[in-house]
Amino acid sequence: MISDKIMKQVISKIVKTAIPSKTIKKSKKEIADMVYKLVEKEIQKYSEVVELEFGGSYAKDTWLPNNADIDIFIKFKKNISEEKLENISKEIGFNSLKKYSPYVRYSQHPYVEAKIKNTKINIVPCYDVRIGEWKSAADRSPFHTKFMKKSLTLKMKNEVRVLKIFLKSNKIYGAEIAQQGFSGYISEVLILEFGDFENLIKSISKIKENQIIGKTSKIFDTSIIVIDPIDSNRNLAAAISNENIGKFILICRALKQKPSLEFFKTKKSQVANKFWNNLLIVKFEFKTRSPDIIWGQIKRATTTLSTQLQLGGFTVLRNKSHTNEKNEAYLIFFLESTKISETYLKSGPEFFREDSTNSFISKNLKDAELLWIGDNKKVISLEKRKHTSSVSFMKEFLEKNLQTGIPKGLQNDFKRGFKVFIGNKTLSKSIKEEVSELISVDGTLLHFN
């Protein structure tokens, strides 16, 4: 088939850009070895530490030329308390990277991160356990590294790189909570499962709902299921949003039908500017904390406030959260309309239900605008709304219901002040770009043109 031939040509072109050059490899190795020695020197002070090893894409040789973190795992004796593991690993991380302005990031356990020449260094603690005896999520990582180093051929490693470029170009790469996309490890698992990038694309194009990739005896309820090869009880796809799974399936179909290098370039979304005035935005400032924590908090707050808007009579079409990860956060709601009618229908019980009918009438007779019996045998009242404007509704809700509407960790930030407004007023260019995603035709879908 012609499309198969074109697909092979496209992949071979991408492979050439995906493999790090000897110069880049040499420079990355120098940084990795230097940091390893610094950490190795530091761990001598602690009898609780068993050993040190490289992890992640650097260790597995699946990293991309312009984007490779170096992960170093500190393995602790398994009888050490979580508190001790966290404190010692932070001390080791800060002391060994003190020249490079280290800071703390959070996963299940805090870990230390720093940047050296545009390379992120992660010093991650884990327990030295046997396979299957996990005490923390990071305990699997050394097993992932060992398994992939043994299982992936050189060709497969390069196919993983092609897949990563494909996912990044379509903005669905990255396991962090802000992104909820495909992780580097899932990329490796998918290539290992399907053999190469081309076969993966063809297989995902015709994937069925709840299809299991891998082997497990456990039941999972996610759109697709990707089993961790070293832990058959773990579904790697559980952390990926349905939106990102949907994008992946659609772009695989589009690439299969019409192979092109365009799929490996970022496509700009098409903004429908007429909908700027349908956006309700809540902006607030927060005291600095780990990006993973603030993202989790604002996503929860957005979901809760979306529900409250619906209860207030506003139709929420989409919502999203955004933060600059330093001090500002935005909760954004795309509404069918930011203003709604002054009245709404309230449906009561059927007239055959005597007690319920009496109770409904007596409760609503005084305040309802109108009351009548409908053709559906129910007593109906026409009620007056307190708020017809989404801005006044949201302001009052946040002023009076912080305890129920906002996660505990954000309540003090909101008490210091917040703004509620419509559209693109006072938005900086970078924030405007983020917000505009809600009123855009997704770039991924433009491949179907």
Image (spheres, rainbow, N blue to C red):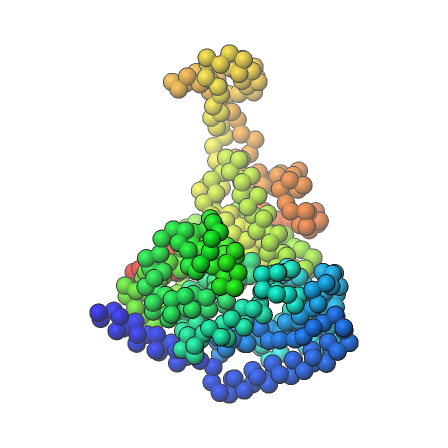
Tell me if residue 46 comes above or below residue 358 in the rendering.
below
State left or right for residue 4 relative to residue 43: left
- Depth check: 15 or 366 in front? 15
- Depth check: 357 or 328 in front? 357
Q: Quadrant of residue 294?
A: bottom right
Q: Where does the N terminus fall, quadrant-wise?
A: bottom left
- Depth check: 416 or 121 in front? 121
**Residue 98, position as x, y percentages in the image:** 72, 76
Q: Where does the C terminus fall, quadrant-wise?
A: bottom left
- Depth check: 4 or 312 in front? 4
Residue drawn at point x = 30 percent, y = 74 percent: 8
Tell me if residue 125 comes above or below residue 221 in the rendering.
below
Residue drawn at point x = 67 percent, y = 63 percent: 110
Tell me if residue 143 comes above or below residue 412 in the rendering.
below
Asked if residue 423 can be seen in this view, the reply is no
Asked if residue 294 can be seen in this view, the reply is yes
**Residue 240, position as x, y percentages in the image:** 49, 56
Residue drawn at point x = 69 percent, y = 78 percent: 39
Residue drawn at point x = 57 percent, y = 51 percent: 299
State left or right for residue 270 relative to residue 60: left
**Residue 440, position as x, y percentages in the image:** 41, 55
